Image (spheres, helix red, strand yellow):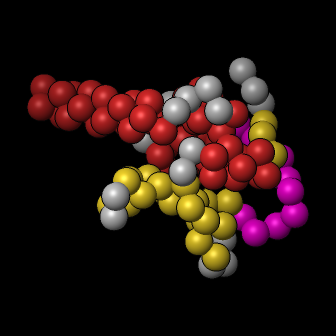
Amino acid sequence: MVASLSQDEIESGLMRKGFRRSHTDHRYLILYVGAKKEAATFLSQGKNQDIGSPMLNAMAKELGLATRDFIDLAKCPLSTEELLAAKKERLASSLRILRRG
């Protein structure tokens, strides 16, 4: 498994998947489907740093993905449609667990 990705690698990978960058104190990367915000994460505004496993895990969680799926999304094997399907499946799985309670 990849231990780190650069900020630029993450940003360019997500931008290729249709995420848009907002210009605020941080680099927010937001995926809109139609007019609806479907997913968002952010990167620090610093120089191009390597993002290690703990932060990759946090970013994956923000998008509702497993870390390996987030890495695939940034490196491009995972499509936007697959992202949305994985996010939906993860939510459904969580709801099933809560219902069993």
Magenta-drawn stretch contains 24:
no
Residue at (39%, 30%) from the top-left corner?
A: 86
Q: Check the picture and name the quadrant holding the N terminus.
A: top right
Q: Is residue 25 left or right of residue 33?
A: right
Q: Is residue 49 above or below residue 96?
A: below
Q: How many marks?
A: 0
Position of residue 43 measured from the top left corner of the image (x, y, whole percent): 68, 60
Q: Is residue 63 left or right of residue 22?
A: left
Residue at (51%, 60%) from the top-left corner?
A: 30
Position of residue 9 measured from the top left corner of the image (x, y, whole percent): 77, 45
Q: Check the picture and name the quadrant holding the C terminus.
A: top left
Q: Is residue 83 visible?
A: yes
Magenta-drawn stretch contains 51:
yes
Residue at (33%, 64%) from the top-left corner?
A: 35
Examine the residues drawn in magenta and state their main secondary structure. Answer: loop
Residue at (27%, 27%) from the top-left corner?
A: 93
Please tell me which residue lies in front, 60 or 9.
9
Q: Is residue 65 visible?
A: no
Please tell me which residue lies in front, 99 or 46.
46
Position of residue 16 measured from the top left corner of the image (x, y, whole percent): 63, 46
> Which residues fall within the magenta stretch?
44-53
Q: As drawn, which residue projects farthest toward the bottom?
A: 24
